[in-house]
Image (tube, rainbow, N blue to C red):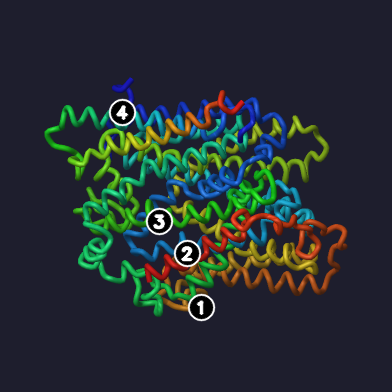
Amino acid sequence: MMAAMMLLFTDRLVHLAPVDFVIIVFYFALVLAIGFYLRGRANTGEDFFMAGREMTAWVAGLSFLSANLGALELMGWAGSAYQYGILATHWYWIGAIPAMLFLALVMMPFYYISKTHSVPGYLKLRFGESSRALSAVSFAFMTVLMSGVNMFAMAKVMQIVLGWDINFSIWVSSLTVAVYVALGGLRSAIFNEVLQFFLIWAGALLIPILGLYETGGWSNLKVLIAQRASTEYVHMWSGLGSFTTNPMGIHWTGIVFGLGSILSMGYWTTDFLVVQRILTAKDIRSAEMAPIIGAGFKMFVPLIVILPGLLGLAVLPMKLTAESAVAAGGHSYNDVLPLMLARYCGPGLLGLGITALIAGFMSGMAGNVSAFTTVWTYDIYRALIKKDATDQHYVNMGRWTTVVGVLISVGTAYLVMQFASIMDYVQALFSFFIAPLFGTVILGMLWKRASGAGGFWGLLCGTASSIGMWTWVKLDPTALRYVALSPNAKALAQDMYQALWSFVVCVVVTVVVSLMTKPKAAAELTGLVYGLTEVPSVGNLPLYQKPVFWAVVVAVALVILNIIMW
Amino acid sequence: MHDSGISIWFFIGLSLLVNGVLIAGAGIWEVMNPPANPSVVLFHLHANVWWGAILAVFGALYCYKFAPKRQS
């Protein structure tokens, strides 16, 4: 069998020993076993699509974080840390923590109390069917494409890192995901996400430990980076006073108002994949604590993502370059994490590190597919096509949709293999919707006067403005000076400002149209909006059991960390 | 997650325990049969031995605490 497996391999970045294969095979066996075990607990709609709504704060919180912590993200951000230095940490701190805390304290009560199953489901209750249909169709379409893009990216990574045949990687991983999600539903996806969380830490934490030992500590690491790149690579804020004094070409306003407010809010509070995990919590307090727990752990993720990239900058003998500029025998920025794994991790440890990457990819796929299945079954099929079938009918639809979703993802993966630029388009597509969606949802939750028509037209116009800005810059790159306020802005900066402007357009249109149209009656908005929702009081609980206490602890820690890394 | 079924934490413990034992075992094998040209930097620290042991201990604790028969 080993010989047969060897035939599938070509040139590779790392060489696996037999014990590494055993570890990888054990992982696949375990996730399938979990799926089969949970088959018996996924027979009702509530169980299959919402994991029975019985998850504890810890499970919901860790899977909420894990759903975002895919291998593409791990490798991509380690690569960004190598390329841009410690500035990449902003995407884990100010670019995530405030949004997660905001979700926990402000938005979660409305999501949870409305008893909805999805973000489009909330929009239906709040604004009506047209808003739901717009967001459900766009979300379902994007999420299954993203799953395919992730699948292709994983297969490509496995080819470069391990020499595995691309078709082998695509089919083995997609069939495994199809089996464990079709059998166990969302609970199975969540279990595997929590497992992935532990595997990632177990597999990747040794890199910063051994790396800091090799470099002689953090201060010495900074000296080495200053010699090999520049001192700008180890300052998080001091170089952001101008577009030209930092490696990313961004100004602090873009980080604070673009990334910190709109882009991160849009993603963390309305991306259905992550919000769905919190909706499975067993009660309102668990639903509020879960994102706070996620935020607490998110603050430490730079240890295993950003620090390896910085260590790579200091210790790797070769120079990494952009993907497009890789010469024969060279490596791109995204290879930094596998290269660091190969540098420090011998037999066994390497297998665990690779398993962590595979787990990251597969749970990303599972997350996208389970989200697609829920939105298709409840927000499109049940809402628009067949409204009055039995619960069992919808569960069966869910299982078949899982399989179909995986097959569409496989098809997308092969399409991306032919036309690599599709990846950029799918990423762009995703970015069109999240900022306007945040505008629509937050106005819906906080402003009683927002009408159904206002919600729909705000969402549509905000999305259209996002598409318009992107197309304008694509056709005329000098337009960047208007969209991103500087001709020197890089792509990341453009994304941030695009999000900011599309949010503004969404909010303005929603407000104007709402003031010109009739709002819903107060009785229809109970449990959906501020002022008409009774949130259970936590007044009589001890301080350490109140979500707001822990949110403040996390926020203070965030500020201290940013000051230390100034 | 603590009904009469197997807890997710038990599965986590199982994963850490098995992986920890395999990794520590590979490390001990390397100590007894050191390669002529180690493929990793800092080979002399034998990270797989102690890291594998740490994972195995955590895994065993989780398996013990969340074992199905202890919960029902």
**Subunit of label 2:** A
Cα gap from disc 3 to disc 1, whole angstroms:
33 Å
Q: Is residue A458 left or right of residue A26?
A: right
Circle number at residue A558: 2
Circle number at residue A482: 1
Q: Secondary structure at mark 4?
A: helix
Quarter of the image with the N terminus of chain A is: top left
Q: Is residue A547 above or below residue A356?
A: below
Task: Tell me residue A212's x, y (percent).
Answer: 26, 54
Cα gap from disc 4 to disc 3, whole angstroms:
29 Å
Of circles 3 and 1, which is in front? 3
Cα gap from disc 2 to disc 4, whole angstroms:
40 Å
**Subunit of label 3:** A
Q: Is residue A36 left or right of residue A378?
A: left
Q: Secondary structure at mark 1?
A: helix
**Subunit of label 1:** A
Q: Which residue is mark 3?
A: A302
Q: Secondary structure at mark 3?
A: helix
At 69% from the left and 74% from the top, the residue drawn is A508
Cα gap from disc 2 to disc 3, whole angstroms:
13 Å
Q: Earlier in the sequence, mark 3 or mark 1?
A: 3
Circle number at residue A19: 4
